Image: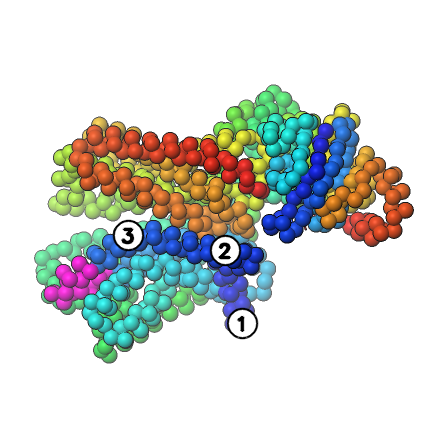
Amino acid sequence: MNRFITLLKTLLINNLGISAIQAKARKNKLEYLKVLGLGVAIAAGVAPSLWLYSKILIQGYDLLAPLGQQGAILILGIVMVSSMIFFFGIFYVINFFYFAGDAQNLLALPLSGWQVLGARFSVVIAYEYLTELPFILPPLLVFGIKSGASLTYWLYALIGFLLIPLLPLSLATIPTVIVMRFANLGRRKDLFKILGGLMVIALAIGYQFLFQKSGINAMDPAFLQNLLTDQYGLVNLISRVFPSTKYLGLALISANKVAGLINLLIFAALSLLAVALAWLVGDKLYFKGLVGSSETTARRKMLTSSDYERFGKGSPALLSYCMKEIRLLFRVPPYFMNCVLTNLLVPVILIIPFLLQSHNKQEALPWEDLISQPVGQTILMVVIVGAVIFLAGSNAITATSLSREGKEFFISKYIPLSYKQQVQAKLLSGYLLGIIGAVLLLIGAIILMPLKIALIGMILAVSLVAIVPIIEAGLLIDIFRPKLDWDNEQKAVKQNLNVVFSILFSILLGGAVLYIVIRFIHSPILAATFMLSCFTVAAVVFYYLLMTRGIEQYRKLEG
Amino acid sequence: MIEIIGVSKSYNSGTVKAVDNVNLTIRNGEIFGFLGPNGAGKTTLIKMITGILNADEGTIKINGKDIRKNPIEAKMQFGFVPDDPNIFARLTGLEYLNFMADVYMVPPETRLDLMQTLLKRFEMAAAAGDLIQSYSHGMKQKIVVIGALLHNPPVWILDEPMTGLDPRSSFDLKEMMREHADTGKTVFFSTHVLDVAEKVCDRVAIINKGKVILGGSMQEIHEHLRENQSLENLFLELTENE
Ligand SMILES: Nc1ncnc2c1ncn2[C@@H]1O[C@H](COP(=O)(O)OP(=O)(O)OP(=O)(O)O)[C@@H](O)[C@H]1O
Ligand SMILES: [Mg+2]
């Protein structure tokens, strides 16, 4: 147990970058201020969304209170957070448990499987607390304050907050550990790791939508009546996705009764049981999935002269540099998972629920009315373009492109390729993948909606321009604060604040432009023209900034 | 030719002076050894010559091209072998070599011949199609050396090139350095092993704590050491290594 605690402490300090900040702060007290400033900036960025979220919750409470169903907002929050933790948990587990460079090193220490897995699990839980906070705090506060809750409620809320991630993360851990155990076979380890990760994600998506679908089918009148008359009807319905969340919801709603305590105990027992199960599975399988996972194939085959010729045709330095970027994005598993896959997967995830729903023929899709009028078409255009922009911001290909080089960054400094061309090559690699994401999303939209060719053309044109400033701004961010000092690849893309900044920027720029369109422009052609002009101007401005300030900073950076 | 004039560099905003007012001229046609114990500042100076670090003071010219004022032309003049060959693990050897050839604008006709000759010479031909990740330390070192030679650079800069090489490859590398210098080109390399410097270098400079304390042919160095007892310890440190 002692060794477990030591390991946990080391991992926590290492992963949260605490010692790095302390080391810097010892030399320069301003470093703490910088960290604080970052925190404030991020808080300011998410504040508007939180405010909106809270407003919706308050309205929901007021609407549901006359029916005695106000507890539903609690459950909604808990279920949402649980699903999120489950889904992100899979990414976290794959990244932290398998892709982390120190994962291998720990194999050499005299530690058992549950100790290492448990310590990593706890680190992820720490991250999950940070992730869940903005989503779960508002419903807890709104319900607590509006219902004038007692001290027990707040105590239960705190305990609940600490317990919530345990079960979904355990549920994410178990299939991942099992799949990775068997993915760690054969010679193409990188490939299998990626495929294994994909499979777990596919399982997760399947699970989620299975439950969503059963919820939709249950919409018959008798059920609805029951829903509204039964005190916990809504609670029951929503918590179907994550059945255990119901107990926490009931514990909070009836915090002052014995039933509340019992429900809390049930929830705690379920959560701890899940953790025990996950650690048990981990004890048996974790190391087996890890041993030798860095082996690769080596054919050691003599190349023929045609092999040399095929490779040795030569291409312009800029394209070659761009190709190198793309090759690494596809070949390094954490880069593939976090940068490329989000790009390809998010469109699919967005489309699936609607596809499942559209089997229900009697139910009209929500946009059927929209599509026939110009205002509706404009709104659709804005929604799709918004999704494209958000996708470009969140895949963070350019926002991590210097960071991904890490210790190899010195190569970019000594090769005779001008910084201007390097910047252009990085933009190009980001843009190519951005196009793929945008086109996939658009294809998805076409499958779902009978869009007119002209509208498709306009959306495509706007999308292809709209991602340019996002990609440029991402690179600018990364040039000014590259994270080069990491010891394993996933830290460059997963634990990199530049990703957050890139997403925030895409929300701000996209949000501002799209808001104006929704508010003031009702014809698709006008909207497209307006958006094209806005994004073109932004693209030019950021390109100019990159080529002046960006390159100046690139020159100052040291490898 | 490499000209280093009054070059200094500190890390951590002035607290560690890693290179302190170094003046050196490395002539065409010679192998120049840069000798010093761990932490002496060898890598730091080499990083400044290659443009990886920016010097705080001083000028560095490679064949007359200033690395700060004329970076691209200066960078075309040299081939560089860094001290850590752990690079581009997810590329194959061949992809890496072609990347380097593209960046240095080596035309396809010349690169194919040269690549095959060098791969054979270092017995790397069979591994060229595999990921660099699958190479041993010495093999990585070799692929980097090959990559640095593809554009037939007038100046060759190597940081601790012998570490990790087996005797045979080490011998080959020294031989290649000699050939390179004999055609009138420049070789500049760092080492902390006196013996290596003694065997291959035309001239050496000894650096300690960021300062060049001695320079000249190996013979001159030995004479100095005999006269100056305080250098004895440093000398011991260098010989005891390896
Ligand atoms: N990135 C860095 N940040 C701070 N100090 C550094 C950094 N790199 C090197 N130093 C310091 O600069 C000095 C010179 O280091 P350098 O790497 O140039 O030595 P070296 O001669 O190459 O040593 P070795 O033989 O071990 O390779 C050392 O005192 C070292 O601690
Ligand atoms: Mg060194």
Mark before the other along the chain sequence, 3 or 2: 2
Mark before the other along the chain sequence, 2 or 1: 1
Do callouts 3 and 2 point to residues on the same chain? yes
- The residue nearer to you, when weighing A449 against A32, is A32
In three-dimensional space, the C-alpha distance between marks 3 and 1, rounded to whole angstroms, equals 44 Å
Q: Please identify the dominant SS of the magenta region.
A: helix
Q: Residue A433, how many percent across, how many down? A: 40, 36
Chain of residue at mark 1: A
Q: Residue A154, how many percent across, how many down? A: 29, 72
In three-dimensional space, the C-alpha distance between marks 2 and 1, rounded to whole angstroms, equals 36 Å
Foreground tag (3 vs 1): 3
Number of other residues with Cα within 10 Å of mark 1, as a class: few under 14, some 14 to 19, many 20 or more: few
Residue occupied by mark 1: A2
- The residue nearer to you, when weighing A376 against A279, is A376
Residue at horizontal 20%, vertical 63%?
A: A72
Number of other residues with Cα within 10 Å of mark 3, as a class: few under 14, some 14 to 19, many 20 or more: few
In three-dimensional space, the C-alpha distance between marks 3 and 2, rounded to whole angstroms, equals 28 Å
In the rendered image, is residue A33 in sight? yes
Q: Is mark 1 within 8 Å of ligand 1?
A: no
Residue occupied by mark 3: A48
Q: Which residues are magenta?
A: A58-76
Give residue A266's quadrant in the image.
bottom left
Q: Residue A125, how many percent across, how many down? A: 41, 62
Residue at horizontal 21%, vertical 30%?
A: A526
Q: Amino acid at mark 3?
A: Pro
Q: Residue A488, how many percent across, how many down? A: 53, 50
Q: Is residue A243 left or right of residue A62?
A: right
Residue occupied by mark 2: A30
